[in-house]
Amino acid sequence: MHLTLLFGGALLIISIFHSPNSPKRTNGRRLPSSNPNSPPRRARPPVSSPLRAPRRRTMAGAVHHHHLLPPRLLSGYPQPPRLRLPLRPRPLRLHPRVASATAASAPSDAALQEFRRWISSHGADTGGAASPAAVPEGLGLVAARGLSRGEVVAEVPKKLWIDADAVAASDLGRALSGGDLRPWVAVSLLLLREAARGAHSPWAPYLAILPSQSDSTIFWSEEELLEIQGTQLLSTTMGVKEYVQSEFDNVEAEIISKNKDLFPGTITFDDFLWAFGILRSRVFTGLRGDKLALIPLADLVNHSDDITSKEASWEIKGKGLFGRDVVFSLRTPVDVKSGEQIYVQYDLDKSNAELALDYGFTKSNSSRDSYTLTLEISESDPFYDDKLDIAELNGLGETAYFDLVLGESLPPQMLTYLRLLCLGGTDAFLLEALFRNAVWGHLELPVSFDNEEAICQVIRNACKSALSAYHTTVEEDEELLERENLQARLQIAIEVRAGEKKVLQQIDGIFQRREEELDGLEYYQERRLKDIGLVGDNGEIIFWES
C-alpha cells in the first residue's frame, strides 16, 4: 500500500507492502484538499484568505515590530519501499526587485511630525497617553505618561480607516462598482491609487511613513530564499507570491489598464506585492476578510512575546452623541511606564514561519517552532469510500492537517487518523458498516502489530527524508546563531529551519520509541478477547469447565 504525506511542501509517497498472508491526529484541521483561491501556509494547507491572521528570533522575551521601509493506500505484492522527495527546492521564479532591497531607516522627523499633526487634526485621540515615535524597531507608540493595564492609548475615527467603505467612497470605488473583488484586492488598489496621488491624497501623511519593504520572506531575493531551502516556509512563500501574481494579472487586465485616469503611471507586480505586504503585516487579526481595515496610528503598535494574554487589546465602539461615531480603540495589555514603548501580542498561535511570512521576524520561543504534517486518503485506496465516511463522521476529511509543536505531544487525533489510513489486510473488517459508529473508538488504541508498525515506519521514513532536504544541521544552525550581528533575514532563516528540524527530530524520536514498544502493546484482538472473558487481565487464557 502507499501512504502519501506532505513534508516541507514536498510530496512523499511511501510504499508499505505486507505479505499476502499477513494481517494487513487534529488538531486534524479539516480543510478542502485543494483551494485555488488561496496559497498554502508554511507548506501548510491552503487558507481561505492570504490575509487571515496568517501565525510562528532575537533573544527570549525580546520584542519586535513593523519594519520601516515606503496518505494514500493501495494493495500490492512485496517490492522495495519507494520514497519520493526532491532534495532541492523547486526553481525560484521571482520577479526582479527594485534597487533598494535592504531595510531603510525610519521616516524623517519632518514626516513624523506631519503625521502627528494629521492624526490630531482628523480626530484621532491619544488622550495624552501615547505618541508615535522613532524606536529601535522603526516606528512605535511610546507612553507619554504612566499607563495602567487596560487603559486606552489611542482612538482612531472611522473616517481615517482604509477599508471597503473608503474604497466605495473613492473615485476608485465607482470604477469597481459591480465588480466582485476580494476585499484585500480592492483595498490594495486603493493604497496604490492614493500613493500615486502623492500630496493630493487625504492619507498622504500616513502613506509617507509606511514601509516600502519589510523582512517578510515575500520580499526576499533568490539568494536569501536559498537559506530556507527544504523548509515549509519556502513553499508557503512561493505559493503566496504565485497567488498574489495571479490576482495582479487579473486586476491589471481588468481594472488598472482600463482606468488610466486613476492609474496614470505604471503599476507593477512589485507595487501590488508591496500593498499586499502592508495589509498582511499591519491589519489587526480580527479585522480581516470582509472586515479588512488599515487603522492609521494604531497600526504602529509593535509586538512583544512577553505579553501572553489572549485578551483582545482593541475594540470597535461607538462614541459621541448616541454612539454614532465609530472609533477603533487601542488599549495597553500591561502597565507601561512613562517613556516606555507600548506593546501588544500579535498572535500567540502563530509559528515562527508565519511570523516570518507575515511580519518579517521570529521569536526564541519553542512554542513558535512547529511543523505541519499533511495526511490524505487516496482515491485509489480500495477502501477509500469507507475510510472517507469514517473520517467525515469524526469531523475530518479526505485530507487532514496536524500542527506539531516543539516540546508538545502529538495532536489528539493524529494517531487515530494514521491508523485509519494504514488499515487493510485482515484488519479491514473494522471498516464494515457494522462497526461504523464504533470504529473510531477502536482506532484510538493500537489495532494490530502490523498496523502500528506501518505508521511508525511511514512517519520515521518521512521525517528522515524531510531532514535530508535541509542543507545544514541543527548543530550548524545553533553555532551560526551564536554569532553576533547576524543580518536580520539570515537570522530569520536560521531560526525557522532550525525550529523545523528540531520538530522533525522530535517526531522521529516519538515514533522510534513507539517502534521499540510494539511487542508490549495491547491490540484490538486481545482487548476483544478480554471483553468476552476469554483472556484475563494479565493475558492468560481462561478455560471454562462444565
Image: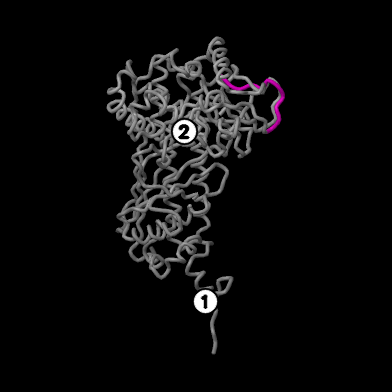
Q: Is residue 142 magenta?
A: yes
Which of the labelled discs sits on residue 38, or is there none? none
- The residue located at (32%, 57%) in the rendering is 381
As for residue 4 lying within the magenta part, the answer is no
Quarter of the image with the C terminus in it: bottom right
* Secondary structure found at label 1: loop
Q: Position of residue 221 (x, y in %)?
A: 40, 22
Answer few, some or many: residues within 10 Å of disc 1's Cα (few below 14, many 20 plus, some between 14 and 19).
Answer: few
Q: Is residue 364 left or right of residue 178?
A: right
The residue nearer to you, when weighing 167 against 78, is 167
Q: Which residue is mark 2?
A: 292
Q: Residue at x 43, y 14 (%)?
A: 200
Q: Tell me which residue sits at (58%, 70%) in the image.
A: 538
Camera-nearest residue between 132 and 366: 132
Q: Separation of disc 2 and disc 1 at Cα? A: 59 Å
Amino acid at dot 1: Ile
Residue 484 visible in image = no
Is 442 located above or below residue 458 in the figure?
Answer: below
Q: Which residue is mark 1?
A: 532
Q: Residue furthest front?
A: 321
Q: Quadrant of the N terminus?
A: bottom left
Q: Secondary structure at mark 2?
A: loop
Residue at the (63%, 31%) spot, across then down:
331
Image coordinates for residue 109, horizontal then vertical, percent: 56, 10
Are the residues at dot 2 and dot 1 in contact (C-beta closer than 8 Å)?
Answer: no
Q: Earlier in the sequence, mark 2 or mark 1?
A: 2
Is the residue 452 above or below the residue 233 in the image?
A: below
The residues colored magenta run 139-149
Percent coordinates x, y for residue 309 in the rendering: 63, 38
Hey, what amino acid is under mark 2?
A: Leu
Residue depth check, mark 2 versus mark 1: number of the one nearer the observer: 2
In the image, residue 422 lies at what x, y percent?
40, 57
